[in-house]
Amino acid sequence: MENVLALALVMLFLFIGEWVSTLSRAYIPSVFVTAVLFLIGYWTFVPKNITSTATFTPTFVGVVQAALLVHMGTLMDLKVLINQWKSVLIAISGILGTVILAMGGGLLLFNWHTVIASVPPLTGGIVAAFLMTDGLKAQHITALVSFPVSMFVMHSIIGYPLTAALLKKEGKRLLKNFQPGEKVKVSKDQEVLETTFGTKRPLKLPKVYKTSAFQIFLVMVLTGLGLWLGDLMNDVISPYILCLIIGVIAHQFHILDDHVLEKAGVFNWFMYGLLAYIFSFLSEVTPQNLFSIVIPILTMIVLGILGMFLASAILAKPLGFSREMAFASALTALFGFPADYIVTHEAARNLAKNKEEEDYILENTLPKMLVGGFATVSVASVIIASVFLKLL
């Protein structure tokens, strides 16, 4: 009975966050709402061990987060990445700008561990936040275990409306060049991206045999391979990076289907478990120390976003991007998919007077945003988090 009630309460916090995000058209991120609910709950009536009682234990999460990295490798066609190399370059440059400015400016203001704990969540999403939180816990740096979580929650609040404003400005610029009545040709890349990163020909088996159990089996075998190779190399290359690489290779050779864990029906459950586990570290935050970490977090976010702006602005003109489009592509590091998809569509829909104009805006913005989000959140942030774990 206790486990059921704990799980019900955790899911209550999660779905309220989703509903608020939907009602606000994602301008209020779901993770922010859910984090606030957990925080208030921990300060009042929620037990500190609610997530483990709800069966989201460290053992469960240890399996899930490695499997999710294999899954992330199935989200994008490498051909699209190559075709959109300019977007990838700008997004990665934004990440590097964040790392350089946040590290340089941060170390002048804060101690080493605070800066190291802050940077990876600034360059990516939930996986980077989890890796840093887990690393801080393993190193017994208990004073900062809630730092990556708080960073993950807060940077999307700033990043989402800023990106929306940039995309609206870019859309207005694009519409000045649009000729009414001109037929918009949807690029091949956009066709792939509009189907949520494409559909490749999966493992050649009759559909009846491609059950959820079979697909989960494949993911777990490949996850185990990644972890085993990491141990074999004594973690010279992070097992998390290896899991991601194996997922990409397996996807390219049609061993794994696109969005394999979603098609297996377990992706949401895995993500909810990972989110609940991450939010459990907010139990360490008291009203008193919340105020003590807000200033460092906001300072690091400002430094990180400034680094993104400077790096993307330098490359914008040489690569044929407007500054607004380049900056928006770099900012995808703060939220990734599906938020980048939603905000791009929202901006186009709000600006366009008809379907033709909307398609024209999307043709020139959506591929750049989605590819940027994949390059930063799915790839670069995992690599950066793995490197920074060794610096703790």
Image (spheres, rainbow, N blue to C red):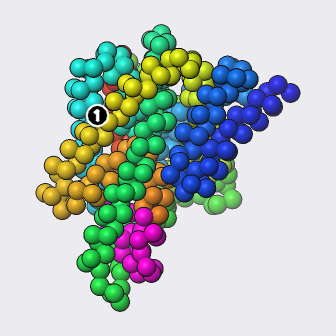
Q: Quadrant of the C terminus?
A: top left
User: Which residue ends up furthest to the top in the rendered image?
Assistant: 140
Quadrant in which residue 271 is drawn: top right
User: Magenta segment range?
Assistant: 347-371
Question: Image point 64% across, 34% down: which residue?
Answer: 37
At numbered mark 1, what does the secondary structure look like: helix, strand or loop? helix
Give coordinates of residue 303: x percent, y percent. Answer: 28, 34
Circle 1 crowding by C-alpha within 10 Å: few under 14, some 14–19, many from 20: many
Give coordinates of residue 154: x percent, y percent. Answer: 46, 36
Q: Nearer the viewer, residue 381 or 203?
A: 381
Which residue, given by chain and number where applicable, does mark 1 sit on? 303
Question: Image point 23% across, 20% down: which residue?
Answer: 108
**Can the viewer see residue 273 in this picture?**
no
**Can the viewer see residue 297 in this picture?**
yes
| Relative vertical location of residue 154 with respect to residue 248 in this rendering, above or below | above
Q: Quadrant of the N terminus?
A: top right
